[in-house]
Image: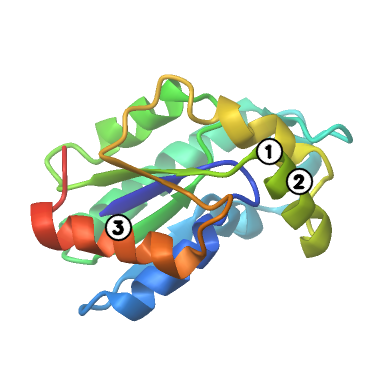
Amino acid sequence: MIVLNGGSSSGKSGIARCLQALLPDPWLALGTDTMVEAMPAALQAAETGIVFGPDGSVSIGSEFRELEDAWTEGVAAMARAGARIIVDEVFLSGAAGQRRWSERLGGLGVLWVGVRCAGEVAAGREIARGDRTVGMAAAQAESVHRGVVYDLEVDTTRTESLECARTIAAHLGGEGAGR
Protein backbone atom coordinates (compact mmCIF):
# COMPACT_ATOMS: atom_id res chain seq x y z
CA MET A 1 0.00 0.00 0.00
CA ILE A 2 0.96 3.57 -0.58
CA VAL A 3 -0.66 6.23 1.59
CA LEU A 4 -0.40 9.76 0.20
CA ASN A 5 -1.25 12.40 2.80
CA GLY A 6 -1.50 16.07 1.99
CA GLY A 7 -3.82 19.02 2.10
CA SER A 8 -6.53 19.77 -0.40
CA SER A 9 -5.18 20.64 -3.86
CA SER A 10 -1.65 19.53 -2.95
CA GLY A 11 -1.45 17.18 -5.92
CA LYS A 12 -2.18 13.78 -4.38
CA SER A 13 -4.71 12.68 -7.00
CA GLY A 14 -2.39 13.62 -9.85
CA ILE A 15 0.45 11.70 -8.23
CA ALA A 16 -1.82 8.68 -7.75
CA ARG A 17 -2.80 8.70 -11.46
CA CYS A 18 0.87 8.98 -12.46
CA LEU A 19 1.80 6.11 -10.14
CA GLN A 20 -0.90 3.96 -11.74
CA ALA A 21 0.70 4.65 -15.13
CA LEU A 22 4.30 4.13 -13.95
CA LEU A 23 4.08 1.08 -11.72
CA PRO A 24 4.33 -2.29 -13.46
CA ASP A 25 1.38 -3.90 -11.65
CA PRO A 26 -2.19 -2.60 -11.44
CA TRP A 27 -2.88 -0.33 -8.45
CA LEU A 28 -6.27 0.92 -7.27
CA ALA A 29 -6.46 4.59 -6.31
CA LEU A 30 -8.91 5.25 -3.49
CA GLY A 31 -9.28 8.33 -1.39
CA THR A 32 -11.16 10.33 1.11
CA ASP A 33 -13.00 12.07 -1.76
CA THR A 34 -14.21 8.63 -2.92
CA MET A 35 -15.63 7.96 0.53
CA VAL A 36 -17.28 11.39 0.85
CA GLU A 37 -18.88 11.03 -2.60
CA ALA A 38 -20.26 7.62 -1.60
CA MET A 39 -21.91 9.01 1.54
CA PRO A 40 -25.58 9.95 1.62
CA ALA A 41 -26.04 13.61 0.69
CA ALA A 42 -27.64 14.25 4.08
CA LEU A 43 -24.32 13.45 5.81
CA GLN A 44 -22.35 15.75 3.54
CA ALA A 45 -23.69 18.82 5.30
CA ALA A 46 -24.67 17.60 8.76
CA GLU A 47 -22.96 18.01 12.12
CA THR A 48 -22.86 14.22 12.52
CA GLY A 49 -21.33 13.85 9.04
CA ILE A 50 -18.92 16.24 7.37
CA VAL A 51 -19.35 19.98 7.10
CA PHE A 52 -17.26 22.23 4.87
CA GLY A 53 -17.23 25.69 6.42
CA PRO A 54 -17.27 28.86 4.29
CA ASP A 55 -13.75 29.64 5.55
CA GLY A 56 -12.34 26.31 4.31
CA SER A 57 -12.62 24.54 7.65
CA VAL A 58 -13.80 20.93 7.77
CA SER A 59 -15.76 19.52 10.70
CA ILE A 60 -16.13 15.80 11.21
CA GLY A 61 -19.00 14.25 13.18
CA SER A 62 -19.61 10.88 14.83
CA GLU A 63 -21.48 9.27 11.92
CA PHE A 64 -18.71 10.29 9.52
CA ARG A 65 -16.12 8.76 11.86
CA GLU A 66 -18.11 5.49 12.01
CA LEU A 67 -18.28 5.31 8.23
CA GLU A 68 -14.60 6.22 7.98
CA ASP A 69 -13.71 3.36 10.33
CA ALA A 70 -15.66 0.93 8.13
CA TRP A 71 -14.07 2.45 5.01
CA THR A 72 -10.50 2.05 6.28
CA GLU A 73 -11.25 -1.49 7.43
CA GLY A 74 -12.60 -2.29 3.95
CA VAL A 75 -9.58 -0.78 2.20
CA ALA A 76 -7.29 -2.81 4.49
CA ALA A 77 -9.28 -5.98 3.66
CA MET A 78 -8.79 -5.35 -0.07
CA ALA A 79 -5.05 -4.98 0.50
CA ARG A 80 -4.95 -8.16 2.56
CA ALA A 81 -6.78 -9.91 -0.30
CA GLY A 82 -3.92 -8.94 -2.63
CA ALA A 83 -4.99 -5.62 -4.14
CA ARG A 84 -2.30 -2.98 -4.50
CA ILE A 85 -3.79 0.26 -3.26
CA ILE A 86 -2.82 3.93 -3.36
CA VAL A 87 -4.72 5.87 -0.71
CA ASP A 88 -5.23 9.59 -1.39
CA GLU A 89 -5.87 10.94 2.11
CA VAL A 90 -6.12 14.14 4.12
CA PHE A 91 -5.20 13.61 7.78
CA LEU A 92 -7.35 16.44 9.14
CA SER A 93 -6.30 15.42 12.64
CA GLY A 94 -2.62 14.99 11.72
CA ALA A 95 -0.96 12.18 13.67
CA ALA A 96 -4.31 10.88 14.97
CA GLY A 97 -5.41 10.28 11.38
CA GLN A 98 -2.26 8.32 10.66
CA ARG A 99 -2.78 6.25 13.84
CA ARG A 100 -6.31 5.33 12.75
CA TRP A 101 -5.04 4.11 9.37
CA SER A 102 -2.01 2.41 10.91
CA GLU A 103 -4.23 0.38 13.27
CA ARG A 104 -6.24 -0.89 10.30
CA LEU A 105 -3.18 -1.58 8.14
CA GLY A 106 -1.25 -3.55 10.77
CA GLY A 107 0.82 -6.31 9.19
CA LEU A 108 0.69 -4.80 5.70
CA GLY A 109 3.60 -3.22 3.88
CA VAL A 110 2.80 0.49 3.76
CA LEU A 111 4.76 3.34 2.24
CA TRP A 112 3.73 6.56 4.02
CA VAL A 113 4.23 9.54 1.71
CA GLY A 114 3.80 13.17 2.68
CA VAL A 115 2.65 15.33 -0.22
CA ARG A 116 3.56 18.92 0.55
CA CYS A 117 2.67 22.06 -1.35
CA ALA A 118 3.07 25.68 -0.31
CA GLY A 119 -0.25 27.04 0.88
CA GLU A 120 -0.36 29.88 -1.63
CA VAL A 121 0.29 27.49 -4.55
CA ALA A 122 -2.35 25.02 -3.33
CA ALA A 123 -4.78 27.93 -2.90
CA GLY A 124 -4.24 28.93 -6.54
CA ARG A 125 -4.95 25.36 -7.64
CA GLU A 126 -8.04 25.31 -5.45
CA ILE A 127 -9.44 28.37 -7.22
CA ALA A 128 -8.59 26.93 -10.65
CA ARG A 129 -10.34 23.63 -9.79
CA GLY A 130 -13.54 25.38 -8.82
CA ASP A 131 -14.85 22.37 -6.89
CA ARG A 132 -13.42 23.15 -3.44
CA THR A 133 -14.32 25.59 -0.72
CA VAL A 134 -11.92 28.52 -1.02
CA GLY A 135 -9.60 28.54 1.98
CA MET A 136 -9.43 24.79 2.48
CA ALA A 137 -6.05 24.37 0.73
CA ALA A 138 -4.34 27.10 2.74
CA ALA A 139 -5.88 25.86 6.00
CA GLN A 140 -4.71 22.29 5.42
CA ALA A 141 -1.30 22.86 3.80
CA GLU A 142 0.64 22.37 7.04
CA SER A 143 -1.90 21.12 9.59
CA VAL A 144 -2.39 17.70 7.94
CA HIS A 145 1.32 16.95 8.44
CA ARG A 146 1.52 17.73 12.18
CA GLY A 147 3.01 14.77 14.01
CA VAL A 148 2.79 12.48 10.96
CA VAL A 149 5.79 10.24 10.31
CA TYR A 150 6.64 9.55 6.68
CA ASP A 151 8.90 7.16 4.82
CA LEU A 152 9.18 9.71 2.04
CA GLU A 153 8.06 13.27 1.31
CA VAL A 154 7.52 15.00 -2.01
CA ASP A 155 6.75 18.65 -2.66
CA THR A 156 4.52 19.66 -5.56
CA THR A 157 5.08 23.38 -5.10
CA ARG A 158 7.52 23.41 -8.01
CA THR A 159 7.68 19.73 -8.97
CA GLU A 160 5.20 18.11 -11.37
CA SER A 161 3.09 15.12 -10.31
CA LEU A 162 4.93 12.82 -12.72
CA GLU A 163 8.32 13.62 -11.19
CA CYS A 164 6.94 13.10 -7.68
CA ALA A 165 5.45 9.77 -8.80
CA ARG A 166 8.83 8.74 -10.22
CA THR A 167 10.46 9.51 -6.87
CA ILE A 168 7.87 7.37 -5.07
CA ALA A 169 8.16 4.53 -7.61
CA ALA A 170 11.96 4.56 -7.27
CA HIS A 171 11.59 4.37 -3.49
CA LEU A 172 9.28 1.36 -3.85
CA GLY A 173 11.70 -0.36 -6.20
CA GLY A 174 14.74 0.31 -4.07
CA GLU A 175 13.41 -0.22 -0.56
CA GLY A 176 10.02 -1.93 -0.77
CA ALA A 177 7.15 -0.77 1.37
CA GLY A 178 8.09 0.75 4.69
CA ARG A 179 6.66 0.32 8.16
Residue type indicated by callout 1: Gly
Instruction: Pick the quarter of the image with the N terminus.
Output: bottom left
Q: Residue 119 carries which label?
A: 1
Along the viewing direction, whichever of 27 and 79 lies nearer the viewer: 27
Q: Distance between the residues labelled 1 and 3?
A: 22 Å
Q: Earlier in the sequence, mark 1 or mark 3?
A: 1
Residue at image position (89%, 35%) is: 54
* 106, above or below 77, in the image: above
For mark 2, give the secondary structure.
helix
Q: Which mark is residue 148?
A: none
Along the viewing direction, whichever of 25 and 145 lies nearer the viewer: 145
Graded by Cα atoms within 10 Å as few (under 14), some (14 to 19) or many (20 or more), the crowding at tag 1 reads: many
Q: Which mark is residue 168?
A: 3
The x, y position of residue 120, in whole percent, is 74, 41
Q: Name the residue tied to disc 2.
A: 123
The x, y position of residue 97, in whole percent, is 44, 29
